[in-house]
Image (cartoon, helix red, strand yellow):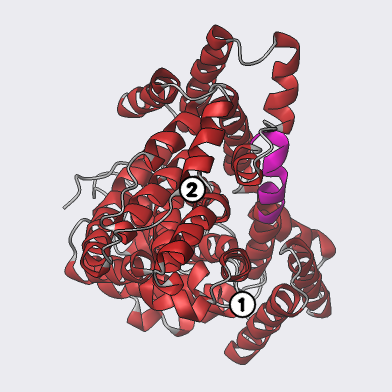
């Protein structure tokens, strides 16, 4: 039934108690101590190991649960390595700087909030990181909003909406790659399938911001001009630097080349551009691909935006992935998650109810733990067999995990993203929450589409590995 077979069947009370204990350990570590998720995950893992030993299970059996859980993440680990290399390559090749510069060219005093949303969306897709987008482009827009006397709460809502749209739809995003890898869905197939819910959410959000945008007639765009000039001063910004590597990525995607080879092709094309333009000597190339690109423009915001990438930059994420998957594997091996799902099994017999349950689980993990990685990982692991049982292909679950997992995290005041955004922008989570329309709409739309049966992909009855056309 599940990928990892349970070796015992605890009582419902016992399963609930251990679940609450694990959530408490992780939540307390992340929220109270403001620790990185790694150490709380280690403590939660140790708690489950002790529980297994108390239940007189052999240590080898417990270790098998840990390794079986981690095994599912190896595909994601290799993808993350190539993402880090691609980001570094796109920096030295001028791709990301060129795309960001082009995005800021869209800024005008009219429809300010809509433009903030669109530009942060573009930057988010280019960078593949919502928090980097918030800390750079978002901070610049907060400065403009302050000068223009525009509501900072609403501006922050537009920034968060755009940043997480970009993060969700970017092939460079760690959460996007994680969701597709864990559920064994092709990366670009996953992104295309997310468009069914993400594009309507984007359009509705853009329309709302267009309506509520104030008319700005006299404001200073000094910060934006400084930002753009800083990008130009790097010497990396040209139209072809931005176009060619992206075109390679798109063409490979259309040809359905495997994600790992697509990322490698995108990186190679950017490296070629870097050599053509003389951006980097050969002897420095491997160092940059490993350690990332370091910007030295002297403009703090520009340097923060462009100093990133490299294989080593993915180690933080890879650590979380392996620890979270190990924790999930042990939860299944000890029978805790299967027992909880069994208690609501009678309610999970229809497509709509299964999708709604998965969405609320992803939201609940975000609220209780404040960690989007665990939200994606545990939701994917818990509901994969249940989706198959009602005939739904895995890419439906990967979409739900992102719609209700990735974009909900910034709406939780004690979450990793919520704390970071509040600290960076100087706007409280509860203040911008009502205006983060994209993040609010995404889980609603994924549940509604699930209940209606529209835009879902079903497993063909003749084979469990081929999928029918999208409804």
Distance between the alpha carbons at the discs numbered 1 and 2: 34 Å
At a point 36% along the width and 62% down the height, the residue shown is 387
Q: Judge whether residue 361 can be spotted in this image.
A: no
With respect to residue 49, does 264 lie above or below? Answer: above
Which span is picked out in magenta?
309-320
Compared with residue 80, is residue 323 higher up or lower down, i.e. above or below? below
- Is 312 colored magenta in this rendering? yes
The structure residue drawn at horizontal position 58% and vertical position 80%, both measured from the top left corner, is 368
Residue sitting nearer the eye, 466 or 111? 111
Which of pointers 1 and 2 lies earlier in the amino acid sequence? 2
Q: Which numbered marker is on residue 336? A: none
Query: Is residue 125 highlighted in magenta?
Result: no
Name the residue that disc number 1 marks.
414
Residue lying farthest bottom?
13
User: Mark on residue 222?
Assistant: 2
Q: Residue 98: percent from the left, percent from the top?
A: 46, 29
Instruction: Please identify the dominant SS of the magenta region.
Output: helix
Q: Which one is nearer the viewer's eye here, 222 or 240?
A: 222
Q: Position of residue 464 (x, y in %)?
A: 33, 47
Quadrant location of residue 428? bottom right
Residue 166, given in percent of the width and then of the height, sits at 42, 49
Q: Secondary structure at mark 1?
A: loop
Question: Is label 1 or label 2 in front?
Answer: 2
Q: Quadrant of residue 388?
A: bottom left
Q: Residue 163 or 450: which is nearer the viewer?
A: 163
Q: Are marks 1 and 2 in contact (CB under 8 Å)?
A: no
Residue 177 can be seen in this image: yes
Label 2 residue SS: helix
**Of the pair 246 and 275, the residue shown nearer to us:** 275
Classify mark 2: residues with Cα within 10 Å, few (<14), some (14-19) or many (20+): few
């Amino acid at each position: 039934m599940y990928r990892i077979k349970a070796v015992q069947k605890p009582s419902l009370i016992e399963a609930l108690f251990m679940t609450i204990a694990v959530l408490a350990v992780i939540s307390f570590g992340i929220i109270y101590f403001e620790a990185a998720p790694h150490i709380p995950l280690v403590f939660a893992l140790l708690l489950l190991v002790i529980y297994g030993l108390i239940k007189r299970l052999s240590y080898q059996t417990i270790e098998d649960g840990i390794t079986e859980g981690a095994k599912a993440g190896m595909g994601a680990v290799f993808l993350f390595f190539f993402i880090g290399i691609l980001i570094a390559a796109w920096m030295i090749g001028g791709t990301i700087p060129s795309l960001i510069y082009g995005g800021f060219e869209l800024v005008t005093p009219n429809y300010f909030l809509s433009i903030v949303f669109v530009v942060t969306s573009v930057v988010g897709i280019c960078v593949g990181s919502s928090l980097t987008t918030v800390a750079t482009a978002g901070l610049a827009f907060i400065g403009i909003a302050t000068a223009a006397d525009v509501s900072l709460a609403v501006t922050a809502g537009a920034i968060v909406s755009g940043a997480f749209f970009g993060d969700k739809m970017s092939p460079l995003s760690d959460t996007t790659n994680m969701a597709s890898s864990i559920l064994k869905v092709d990366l670009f197939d996953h992104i295309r399938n997310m468009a069914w819910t993400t594009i309507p959410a984007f359009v509705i959000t853009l329309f709302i911001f267009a309506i509520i945008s104030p008319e700005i007639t006299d404001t200073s765009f000094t910060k934006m001009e400084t930002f753009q000039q800083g990008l130009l001063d790097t010497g990396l910004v040209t139209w072809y630097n931005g176009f060619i590597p992206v075109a390679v990525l798109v063409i490979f995607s259309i040809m359905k080349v495997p994600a790992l080879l697509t990322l490698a092709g995108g990186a190679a094309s950017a490296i070629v551009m870097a050599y053509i333009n003389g951006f980097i000597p050969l002897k420095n190339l491997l160092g940059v691909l490993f350690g990332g690109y370091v910007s030295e423009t002297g403009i703090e915001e520009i340097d923060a935006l462009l100093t990133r990438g490299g294989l080593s930059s993915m180690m933080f994420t890879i650590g979380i992935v392996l620890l979270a998957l190990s924790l999930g594997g042990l939860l299944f091996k000890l029978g805790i998650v299967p027992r909880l799902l069994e208690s609501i099994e009678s309610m999970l017999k229809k497509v709509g109810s299964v999708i709604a349950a998965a969405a609320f689980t992803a939201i609940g993990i975000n609220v209780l733990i404040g960690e989007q990685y665990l939200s994606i990982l545990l939701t994917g692991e818990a509901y994969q067999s249940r989706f198959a049982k009602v005939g739904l292909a895995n890419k439906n679950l990967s979409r739900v995990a992102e719609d209700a997992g990735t974009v909900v995290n910034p709406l939780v005041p004690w979450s990793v993203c919520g704390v970071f955004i509040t600290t960076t922008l100087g706007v409280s989570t509860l203040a911008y929450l009502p205006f983060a329309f994209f993040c609010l709409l995404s889980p609603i739309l994924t549940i509604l589409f699930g209940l209606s049966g529209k835009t879902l992909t079903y497993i063909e009855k003749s084979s469990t590995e081929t999928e029918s056309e999208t409804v």
